[in-house]
Amino acid sequence: MKQNRHNHVRLPAAILAVLGLSTVSASAMHIAEGYLPKVWAFGWMAVCIPFVAAGFLSIRKKVERSPKAKVLLAMCGAFAFVLSALKLPSISGSCSHPTGVGLGAILFGPTATTVLGLIVLLFQALLLAHGGLTTLGANLFSMAIVGPLVSWGVYRGLKKAGAKPAVAVFCAAALGDLLTYVTTSFQLGVVYGNITEYLTIFAVTQIPLAIAEGLLTVVVFNVLEKYSAAELRELSVL
Amino acid sequence: MGTDRYAYLSRLRRVDPVAKVWTALAVLLLCLFSESIAVGLVTLVVMGVLNMALGGQRPGTVLHFMKVPLAFLVIGCLTIVLRPLGAEEPALWAVWLFGRFRWGISGAYLRMGLMVFCKAMGAISAMYFLALNTPMTDLVLALERLHVPKLLVELMELIYRFIFVLMDAAGRIRVAQESRLGYGSFRKSLDHMGDLVSLVFLRAWRKGDKVYTALESRGYDGSLTTLSAAYTGGARVYAWGAAAIALQAAALLVERRLLT
């Protein structure tokens, strides 16, 4: 009898612990300041440089063509920051934060997303202590380079293959989200030699979140298509 | 929002931001490069104290912000400490899972986990010395003086301003939705969240349009020029930074001496 009562307590406790992990992981997607050893911290920065340079040049070209692009790009960057601060409804009832990786990549293209991501990540590190200065390179690589490139590639590929727009948007957002976490797990695991551990933690917590974010992005896209076709055409998404 | 609220109240607010950038970065990098428990703890304490003594931040504020990255660090360091071991590997504590996998804690990895935790806490403390004493607008202007490309600096200035505009819009929409029984079930929350996100995007786009029109009617020629505020010299901050670095170096030497 006594044993039984213990089990009654233990099962909900275990479930709560797992759910707790999934809320924690929202801030855990940014690698904290000082967590990476120096070689990796600076190595990831070096890897990011060509991508940031390419993004910067493409933005400069856009701005030279029309000065209005600067203001609109800045609005998009601020939108990305605000998006990451919103609470995403999650199946477990708890909340997490959307990454906005997929939406950003589809709307603004992967090169502009990289530069905007750099600024947004810097603000997040300094204002909210999500991420850090020395881990900026690693975070930038997973969230503003790999994720957007995957999302954009999947979206373009599926659209060309003639998939329904909703399917393309869902796959792009969910896969971009997942690949971001896989990259983060890899970045963390490769340092201390325990990639599988991180992958299992992230698999449990992130797959539901990736699906939720995919669904959310579809809803957002439907509304945008209905009410702001003109703006989307200006962004050359449609 | 976040650290910015406190940065505007800091006593170091008028001090040259470039001095704060270099000081914080030097202390941070030394903490990162020394990879030692003692240096991490010394950095954590010294920069925390400097934040309170020089910047005039309340201890509660500093502690509150130190807690933010804690969740990540605890999980991250636990996965370093607790790991699969070979059957014969010496361990402080180990357990057989399903009779096949041996998981446990070994002395070397326990020390490594502790080192990473202390190093990260020290580095975070150093970063807060910058974040809690420098408003973002000052920091962005300082970046321009450090030869960050003009276009990037302008984008940062604009984004920083627009964040508050959009946050405000998002907050209002959220209140309006919730007061009309929004976010009831998972399905509904997805729909309502989608409405919110797309509306904020639309607002952002139209606001951008309006801002551009307003700028252009006031003679905008493609760049925003602002004057930076008058700053007092950073000699005092540099001096305290040098003292912090000396303490870090002393901690490193003492630790090396004790370990060998």
Image (cartoon, rainbow, N blue to C red):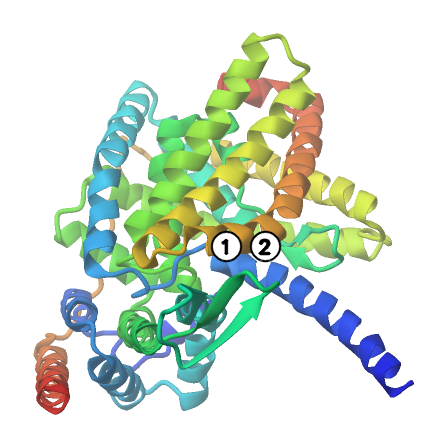
What is the chain letter for disc 1?
A: B
Q: Is residue B130 visible?
A: yes
When asked about the image quadrant of residue A22, the answer is bottom right
- Judged left or right of residue A156, residue A10 is right
Residue displayed at 29% across by 48% down: A137
> What's the amino acid at mark 2?
Asp
Q: Are marks 1 and 2 in contact (CB under 8 Å)?
A: yes
Q: Residue B73, which numbered label?
A: none
User: Is residue B67 placed above or below B181 in the rendered structure?
Assistant: below
Residue displayed at 22% across by 85% down: B38
Tell which of A44 and B46 is nearer to you.
Answer: A44
Q: Residue furthest right?
A: A1
Q: Where residue B226 sits: x, y (%)?
A: 25, 50
Separation of residues labelled 1 and 2 (CA atoms): 6 Å
Q: Residues within 10 Å of mark 2 (few under 14, many from 20)?
A: some
Q: Label 1, secondary structure: give it.
A: helix
Q: Mark 1 sits on what residue?
A: B164
Q: Where residue A227 sits: x, y (%)?
A: 69, 25
Q: Where residue B182 sits: x, y (%)?
A: 82, 51
Tell which of B30 and B112 is nearer to you.
Answer: B112
Tell which of A133 and B203 is nearer to you.
Answer: A133
Q: Mark 2 sits on what residue?
A: B168
Q: Where residue A8 sits: x, y (%)?
A: 85, 76
Q: Label 2, secondary structure: give it.
A: helix
On-image quarter of the C terminus of chain B: bottom left
Q: Is residue B214 visible?
A: no
User: Is residue B15 placed above or below A115 in the rendered structure?
Assistant: below
